[in-house]
Structures are given as C-alpha cells and as structure tokens.
Image (cartoon, grey):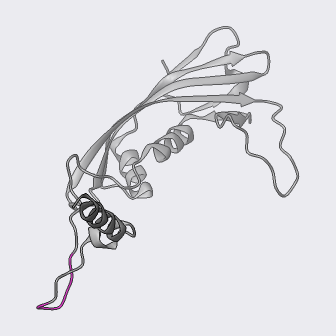
Amino acid sequence: MSQTTVFRVADLSQNRPTSFDLRPEPEALKALAQEFGLEDLRKVRFHGEINAHGKRDWQLKATLGATIGQICVVTLDQMSTRVDTPVHRLFLRELQTPDEEEIEMQEDDSIEPLGPEIDLEALMAEALALEIPEFPRKKNAQLGEAVFAEPGITPMRDEDTRPFAGLSALKDALNSAAKE
C-alpha cells in the first residue's frame, strides 16, 4: 500500500494492481478546506488501486471518504456532512481531442487523457469538490415564510401568490352554487 501521491505511469506494474491509501495531513486538509470555502474538513481518506487497462491505458478504482463541515443555509448553524463515494477514472493514452470550437461532451465523464504521471492528490481534490453540497441544509431545517406589510394591512402570504389559487376558490364557489 503506497502513500505516494504521484505515480509515474512508466513505473506502474502491468501485471498487478498498484494500491494506494491517501490520508492527508492536517495542514493539507486545512488548505483544502480553505480552497473550497469550507468551515472544516476531517477524516479524509482516498484509497483504491490503479490497474492496467489493455496494453497502454490505465484504470483507477477508488473510494473517497470525508467529513465536511459547512454552514447550514437555513439556520446558519455549523453542520457536518459525511461523503463516501466511489471514484472511477479511465486514463487513455490515445484520447482524441477535437480541435473544433464547439464539441459534443462525452457521455462517460470518467475518461481522462493519460499523461506521464497520475496525480492522486489532484484526483482526490477534484472528486471532493464534486461531492461538496452547494446548499448544505440541516436535517429538518425549515425555511419559514417571510411576511411583510404595513400596520393595519393583511400581509400577502406565499399561498396568495400562486396564480391558480384564485381560480381554485372561484371553482369551489361555482361548484357549491351549482349544488344548491
């Protein structure tokens, strides 16, 4: 099991998987948290293996685990989110890159061009960035209704702004009049 963060492709074994287990130091976690605008980042572990895929390509299969500290967008309280996600990458030596201005995106977003090195730290940071909740919300946090009006005026509620709310009331009135 290796703690190395950058593997030279030329040094990887074609016959057996290269295992890795990254657990960044506290200083690195602090830097990542700052880079991603997080309150806290703990228990980060990126582990898996790199295997030969054919004669010239490589495949990475890993798991990323992290505890992310953020501020709830509703309550503004500190909260934690646990992330445990699989990470798959296929590094292709001869990945065709079109020269046109507009191109179609590939359906498989796990395909990467193969360079001289595979940087596990960069892959871990990318996978983590994709898993960070954009709008973190504590469980059962309720977004209340804001009601504003001058004194003596009945405030307009969210229900009143719905375009078909009036039609529903009119329909109910017509139905009750028809029954009489």
For the point 35% across and 51% down, the residue is 30
Horizontal and vertical percent position of residue 159: 27, 67
Horizontal and vertical percent position of residue 98: 86, 46
Q: Is residue 21 visible?
A: no
Q: Is residue 160 above or below residue 86?
A: below
- Residue 162 occupies quadrant: bottom left
Outermost residue on the top side: it is 15
Q: Nearest the camera: 35 or 170?
A: 170
Residue 150 lies in the magenta stretch: yes
For the point 11% across and 91% down, the residue is 152
Horizontal and vertical percent position of residue 57: 75, 23
Residue 16 lies in the magenta stretch: no
Image quarter in which the C terminus is found = bottom left
Horizontal and vertical percent position of residue 64: 44, 32
Q: Nearest the camera: 139 or 41?
A: 139
Most common SS among magenta residues: loop
For the point 32% across and 69% down, the residue is 170
Question: Relative to residue 116, is residue 136 drawn left or right?
Answer: left
Outermost residue on the left side: it is 152
Q: Is residue 105 above or below residue 85?
A: below
Q: Is residue 179 visible?
A: yes
Q: How many marks?
A: 0
Outermost residue on the bottom side: it is 151
Question: Relative to residue 160, is residue 33 drawn left or right?
Answer: right
Q: Is residue 60 above or below residue 144?
A: above
Q: Nearest the camera: 145 or 104?
A: 145
Find the magenta span and give its range.
147-152
- Residue 101 occupies quadrant: bottom right
Q: Is residue 152 above or below residue 143?
A: below
Outermost residue on the right side: it is 99
